[in-house]
Amino acid sequence: MKIAIGGMKKNEMEAAIKKASDGKIETVITTDIGAVPMLKKGEVDYYIGGCESGGGAAISILIGMIGYSKCCTVAKNGHVAKKEEVEKFISDGKIAFGLAVDSIDGTIPVLVEALLEHQK
């Protein structure tokens, strides 16, 4: 599995993904616009973007370029994603995830676990 990372605190998100996946997930740091062709060509499986709110700059370009039905916000300010919510997003076909950067430590492990379980 390969995940493109964009938005704010990219390096922190990358470190959290690598730690939570025990190295099972490959990452590429890019921009939101740079991630779109990667997703469309199948060069990456998912995108995770971070911003202050989790629903603005983290995901808005992806919504416009790959469609709302493939995008979601997994964690807004002050909210950490629940595993059940994340599993539903994945089973509904979401491939681009926005999150508030203040939720990286709590949300990335949940998201990574759900993505790895979905891959099985």
Image (cartoon, rainbow, N blue to C red):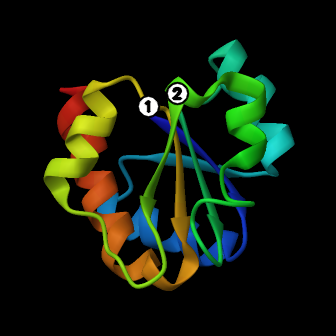
The CA distance from mark 1 to mark 2 is 4 Å
The total of numbered circles placed on residues is 2
Q: Residue 108: x percent and y percent?
A: 38, 65
- Let me know if residue 45 appears in the view: no
Q: Which mark is residue 70?
A: 2
Task: Decide: few, some or many residues near mark 2? Use Cα within 10 Å; few <14, some 14-19, many ≥20.
Answer: some
Q: Is residue 104 above or below residue 1?
A: below
Give the quadrant of residue 40.
top right
For label 1, the residue is: 94
In the image, is 48 to the left or to the right of 43?
Answer: left
Q: Furthest-top residue in view?
A: 41
Q: Residue 51: x percent and y percent?
A: 67, 71
CB atoms of marks 1 and 2 within 8 Å: yes
Three-letter amino acid code at the position of disc 2: Lys
In the structure shown, which secondary structural element does the residue marked by tag 1 occupy?
A: loop
Three-letter amino acid code at the position of disc 1: Lys
Task: Decide: few, some or many residues near mark 1? Use Cα within 10 Å; few <14, some 14-19, many ≥20.
Answer: many
- Taking the spot 32% from the left edge, 78% from the top edge, the residue there is 106
Residue in the foreground of this view, choosing between 107 and 113:
107
Q: Residue 20: x percent and y percent?
A: 31, 65
In the image, is 74 to the left or to the right of 53?
Answer: left
Q: Is residue 81 above or below residue 63?
A: below
In the structure shown, which secondary structural element does the residue marked by tag 2 occupy?
A: helix
- Let me know if residue 92 appears in the view: yes
